[in-house]
Image (spheres, helix red, strand yellow):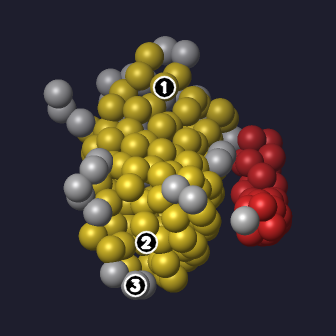
Amino acid sequence: MKLARCLMTVCLMVFLAGPVGLRAAGAAEGVNLGNLTCATKPGTAVQLLLVSSVAVECTFKTAAGEETYKGEIGFLGVDLSRKDSQTLLFTVVGLTSNVKMGSHSLQGDYLGASVAAGILGQGVGSTALVGGVQRSFNLVPSVDTFKGAGISAGGTRMSLEPLKK
């Protein structure tokens, strides 16, 4: 069991080295605007072997305040996992710092890639996305966490729209 956990950790570290490089490159070429935290909504997942999707609620936090979004994350690739809940954490990098709270600048469609692995009810992964208005935002990944088990890797899409409470 310890060997499996160690192997999973090493594989993820090798795979995540790519997104860490993206983070450094993105930070040099763009402006760090804040953090986006997305949580999956229980009971909304649709999962097939190669295609899956789940509804999310996200909070964009900056020094000037926060905005909330709703949306969906879709996946196309090998998905041999069961995720009861998932939290995705992103650093938002933009082309400009001219983002006003309340304008919901992050609304739009995003494309990218993701990978995840988990055993014994706990898992980690990484998702990197580019999109928004005129593809002007990078959602640079940090480590995503989920409750569940299995492996998945492939292309990812996410759509965001303002959440009206």
Judged left or right of residue 143, residue 98 is: left
Q: Is residue 139 above or below residue 67?
A: below
Question: Which residue is drawn at the image coordinates 32% and 24% (left, top)?
Answer: 102
Regarding mark 1 in the picture, which secondary structure is present there?
strand
Mark 1 neighbour density, 10 Å: few (under 14) some (14–19) many (20 or more):
some
Query: Which comes before the other along the chain, label 2 or label 3?
Result: 3
The N terminus, quarter of image: bottom right
C-alpha span from label 1 to label 3: 34 Å
Foreground residue, 9 or 97?
9
- Residue 100 occupies which quadrant of the picture? top left
Tag 1 residue? 61
Tag 2 residue? 75
Q: How many marks?
A: 3
Regarding mark 3 in the picture, which secondary structure is present there?
loop
Q: Which mark is residue 106?
A: none
Tag 3 residue? 49
Residue 62, image x and y in percent?
A: 52, 22
Residue type highlighted by circle 1: Lys
The C terminus, quarter of image: top left
Q: Nearer the viewer, mark 2 or mark 3?
A: 3
Residue 150, image x and y in percent?
A: 54, 70
Judged left or right of residue 132, residue 63 is: right
Residue type highlighted by circle 3: Leu
Query: Which comes before the other along the chain, label 2 or label 1?
Result: 1
Residue type highlighted by circle 2: Phe
Query: Which comes before the other along the chain, label 1 or label 3?
Result: 3
Residue 26, image x and y in percent?
A: 72, 48
Residue 36, image x and y in percent?
A: 50, 37
Question: Which residue is drawn at the image coordinates 56% and 49% (left, top)?
Answer: 145
- Whether the residues at callouts 2 and 3 have beta carbons within 8 Å, the answer is no
C-alpha span from label 2 to label 1: 25 Å
Judged left or right of residue 24, residue 140 is: left
